[in-house]
Structures are given as structure tokens and as C-alpha cells.
Image (tube, grey):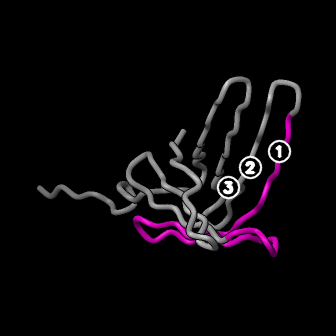
Amino acid sequence: SFTGCSKDDDEFKLAGSTWVWEQNIGSESVSITIKFTTDLDAVYTYRYSDGSYVDSETSRYTYMYEEPYVEFYPEEEGDAVLRGLINGSVMEVTNKSNNRNIGTFTRQ
């Protein structure tokens, strides 16, 4: 008798996943959501609210995943190139243009 497993069964998939970073300080809240819409595309949404004012901005990216890193390349000129370091259900995202940490995102 043979027991086997498919590599695809254990393969980590980003497509269809959503990752979120949130911070609340008093009545102000900031959240960033990264949605991996396909095997190559992602949507980055920044949302700010102070109770009476809400602002949001969306950027589109293509990405490449090579474990444990995901590299995000912006569709719009002037948007930052990003890099994510994935460890299980947590992704640490850095702005590669200025080497600043954006935050620790959690897979939803």
C-alpha cells in the first residue's frame, strides 16, 4: 500500500486571502488592508477615520511570492515598492523605497 500527498495540498496560497493592520488611538482609527485578488494581483487600501472624517485610498499592485517573501510592485508611478515577510498568519510589511516598516498584518 502506498500513501502519498500532493504538493498542491500543502502549498501556501495567497490568492483570495486578506491581510489587515489596524491601530486605534482614542477616536482615531487607521487600517490597511491587502487583498490578494489573483495569483498576480493585490489591492492595498488605506483607511483613516477620526469619528467625523473618513478618508480612504486604494492602490493596485502586482506581486511575486517566493517563500517567505512577497514583493509588491505598484501599478501607479510614485507608489512605493513593498516587501512582505510571511510567517504563518502574520506578514511584516516594509516600504522598500525608504526601508520603513509599515506594520504587522494578520491574515483574516
User: In the image, which is nearer the foreground, mark 1 or mark 3?
Assistant: 1
- Inspect the image, locate mark 2, and give the three-letter code of the amino acid beneath it: Thr
Q: Say left or right for 15 vs 90.
A: right
Cα distance in 3D space between marks 2 and 3: 13 Å
Q: Secondary structure at mark 3?
A: loop
Q: Which residues are magenta?
A: 54-80
Circle 1 residue: 56
Q: Amino acid at mark 3?
A: Thr
| Secondary-structure class at tag 1 | strand
The reply, left or right, for residue 49 in relation to residue 21 is: right
* Residue at (62, 36) in percent of width and height: 23
- Residue 64 in magenta? yes
Mark found first going from the N terminus, 2 or 3: 3
**Residue ID at (54%, 38%):** 108
- Residue at 59%, 55% (x, y): give it: 102
Element at label 2: strand
Residue at horizontal 49 percent and vertical 56 percent from the top: 13
x and y, in percent, of residue 20 in the image: 60, 42
Q: Earlier in the sequence, mark 1 or mark 3?
A: 3
Residue 31 appears left or right of 19: right
- Give the residue number, with chain letter if any, for mark 2: 45
Measure how far apart labels 1 and 3 are at the Cα level: 19 Å
Q: Position of residue 106 (x, y in %)?
A: 51, 42
Amino acid type at mark 1 = Ser
Mark 3 = which residue?
Answer: 37
